[in-house]
Amino acid sequence: MPELVLVRHGKSDWGDPGLADHNRTLNDRGRSDAPRMAERLAASGVGIERLLSSTAVRARTTAEIFGETLGLAPELDPDLYLASAEVLWSSAAASGGESVMVVAHDPGLSELAARLSGGAIDHMPTCAVARFIWRAGSWDDVSGRAADEWSFDTPRSAAGG
């Protein structure tokens, strides 16, 4: 029963215009949203086996925060940096886990979330969490089809507004 959790990295810091995009850190909001969202996901009873992350600092830091809460070490993959929906899906499917979390970037995350939700999720804001579950089959069996059930949570909804 494949399960995929997509997490967009927390809000990043744009304070240093000379800093390469890959090296941007989380800003204050990103550092406060990530632990809150990780706790909410953990409270849902999710059982993640593999935690994959882009190597970008903002994604890696977000993944480390989620990993600490979920008891997993992030597996860094440079191919997830600004990856397409296809690369994100392929990486999760090839990970060897039945329940996989991917922490990465837009627009790939939003495109994949839209596909897997049947178009219901049209945008993954920073630190959003989308969870997709297929009730039967393997990654190969469910490739290309919407999930049997899904949920979507954002820092704004987590804050009650």
Image (spheres, rainbow, N blue to C red):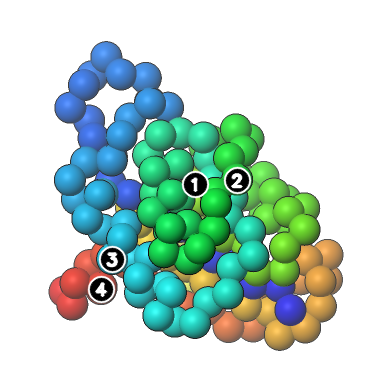
Instruction: Measure how far apart labels 2 and 1 are at the Cα level.
Output: 12 Å
Task: Tell me, yes or no, whether the two marked residues, 1 and 4, touch with CB atoms within 8 Å.
Answer: no
Where residue 145 appears, as percent x and y from the top left, is: 71, 70
The quadrant of the picture occupied by the C terminus is bottom left
Instruction: Measure how far apart labels 3 and 1 are at the Cα level.
Output: 18 Å
- Mark 3 residue type: Arg
Instruction: Measure how far apart labels 2 and 4 are at the Cα level.
Output: 28 Å
Q: Earlier in the sequence, mark 2 or mark 4?
A: 2
Instruction: Measure how far apart labels 2 and 3 are at the Cα level.
Output: 21 Å
Count residues near mark 1 (Cα–Cα under 10 Å), then give few for <14, some for 14-19, many for 20+: many
Identify the image quadrant of residue 112: bottom right
Circle 4 residue:
157
Q: Residue at x 37, y 61 (%)?
A: 128
Q: Earlier in the sequence, mark 4 or mark 3?
A: 3
- Mark 4 residue type: Ser
Tell me the SS state at disc 4: helix
User: In the rendering, which numbered label is found on residue 104?
Assistant: 1
Q: Earlier in the sequence, mark 3 or mark 1?
A: 3
Q: Nearer the viewer, mark 2 or mark 4?
A: 2
Tell me the SS state at disc 2: strand
Instruction: Measure how far apart labels 1 and 4 are at the Cα level.
Output: 20 Å
Count residues near mark 3 (Cα–Cα under 10 Å), then give few for <14, some for 14-19, many for 20+: some
Q: Earlier in the sequence, mark 2 or mark 3?
A: 3
Identify the image quadrant of residue 41: bottom left
Where residue 147 appears, as percent x and y from the top left, is: 63, 76
Q: Nearer the viewer, mark 4 or mark 3?
A: 3
